[in-house]
Image (spheres, helix red, strand yellow):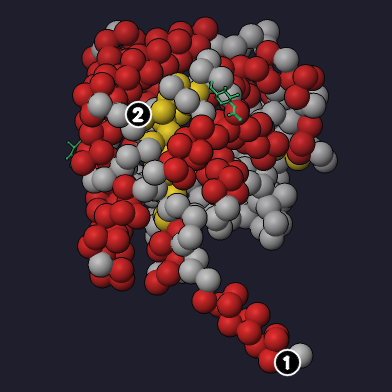
Amino acid sequence: MSLMIGVVVAIATFVPLAEARAFFVFGDSLVDNGNNNYLATTARADNPPYGIDYPTRRPTGRFSNGLNIPDYISRQLGSEPTLPYLSPELTGQRLLVGANFASAGIGILNDTGIQFINIIRMYRQLDYFEQYQSRVTALIGAQRARQLVNGALILITVGGNDFVNNYYLVPFSARSRQFSLPDYVRYVISEYKKLLTRLYDLGARRVLVTGTGPMGCVPAELALRSSNGQCSAELQRAASLYNPQLTEMLGQLNNQYGADIFIAANTRQMANDFVSNPGAYGFVTSKIACCGQGPYNGIGLCTPASNLCPNRDLYAFWDPFHPSQKANGLIVRQFMTGDTTYMNPMNLSTILALDSRT
Ligand SMILES: *[C@@H]1O[C@H](CO)[C@@H](O)[C@H](O)[C@H]1NC(C)=O
Ligand SMILES: *[C@@H]1O[C@H](CO)[C@@H](O)[C@H](O)[C@H]1NC(C)=O
């Protein structure tokens, strides 16, 4: 009997952690798993009630009451959640699961989120990805490290802050004096293309790229810009200019590389579904945040002193900007099974099936 237990324990210990494909995450607060906990910045989610529905019931740095979008994708891959790249726990075999480089507050442009001071801007996230690859090379050799990166799934979620925390941050912002909105959108997309090209050069071969959500409809914008509960027309206009150009740019890159490297995830449509018909998804509201204060609970930050709803699953928005755990799960369900309106050119189920055959 004790021998059998010994064998079982030995097998469990020697199963490599990284049988599933590796997963890498880049971007902003929608996908940050806690990197900003290690930085001197105000853009952080390390106080209660953040994490109130996380398995540990404690804040982790995720901008959610519980799981976020990367966590639900890790589950689909059969992996542990990715650790923040700055976590001291990210060493040895754990590196082979992947890593999360995202940092709340950042945008495509370097001048986005300057008010948050010390955050990991996109070019730096990519520098860290390069550094990560040297660390993995030291662990398993150059050839296997290259295979791990080429075979990985990657998620990148960035762009919303280039509007909310840059162009529209203050009236007469520097960028809004420099560019008309259509010109700004073109500029942001051209800078994004450079970042994605560098990601490809660093070995990325399957990249889910999310568009911006319905930025004008988040509780923060309803509180700031709406008198009657209607979504902010300006931010909705920005989203409707940006998202189609993003999809088009991804298509250009795929043509250039001759493969479906970049997959456009239409998160605007996904979120619009429950913003326009919350009841159909089991929500009582998509206008009022669960945690916050002021109109729509949309003013300021979610803190221990904020209003807090008793049942988070009834709210599409957890805080003034971020979806609830329940909404994150619904979004990833569309990643998995959505048709081409949602996932272009294909959904994640199709990708996982395709890639497991090669
Ligand atoms: C952002 O800053 C980095 C480092 O200074 C620089 O290499 C990069 O070109 C900058 N990107 C933009 C869009 O200005
Ligand atoms: C994924 O996308 C394909 C093609 O659009 C579709 O046929 C399929 O039903 C979707 N869902 C799943 C689970 O594959």
**First in sequence: mark 1 or mark 2?**
1
Quadrant hosting residue 334: top right
Residue 340 visible within the image: yes
User: In the rendering, at what x and y percent does residue 22 appear?
Assistant: 43, 53
User: In the rendering, at what x and y percent does residue 47 appear?
Assistant: 61, 53
Exactly how many numbered labels are in the figure? 2
Q: Amino acid at mark 2?
A: Asp
Q: Secondary structure at mark 2?
A: loop
Real-space Cα separation, disc 1 to disc 2, in angstroms:
51 Å
Quadrant hosting residue 189: top left
Q: Is residue 153 above or below residue 230?
A: below
Q: Give the position of the N terminus as an image quadrant.
A: bottom right
* Quadrant in which ligand 2 is drawn: top right
Graded by Cα atoms within 10 Å as few (under 14), some (14 to 19) or many (20 or more), the crowding at tag 2 reads: some
Q: Secondary structure at mark 1?
A: helix
In the image, 276 versus 258, the foreground residue is 258
Residue marked by disc 2: 260
Graded by Cα atoms within 10 Å as few (under 14), some (14 to 19) or many (20 or more), the crowding at tag 1 reads: few
Instruction: Name the residue located 70 percent from the left edge and 57 percent from the top edge.
Output: 55
Q: Is residue 145 left or right of residue 59?
A: left
Q: Is residue 51 left or right of residue 252?
A: right
Question: Residue placed farthest to the bottom in the image?
Answer: 2
Residue 35 visible within the image: no
Q: Is residue 45 above or below residue 2?
A: above
In the image, 303 versus 348, the foreground residue is 348
Q: Amino acid at mark 1?
A: Ser
Residue marked by disc 1: 2
Q: Is residue 259 left or right of residue 232?
A: left
Decide: marks 1, 2 in contact (CB < 8 A)?
no
Instruction: Name the residue located 43 percent from the left edge and 34 percent from the top edge.
Output: 208
Q: Is residue 44 left or right of residue 39?
A: right
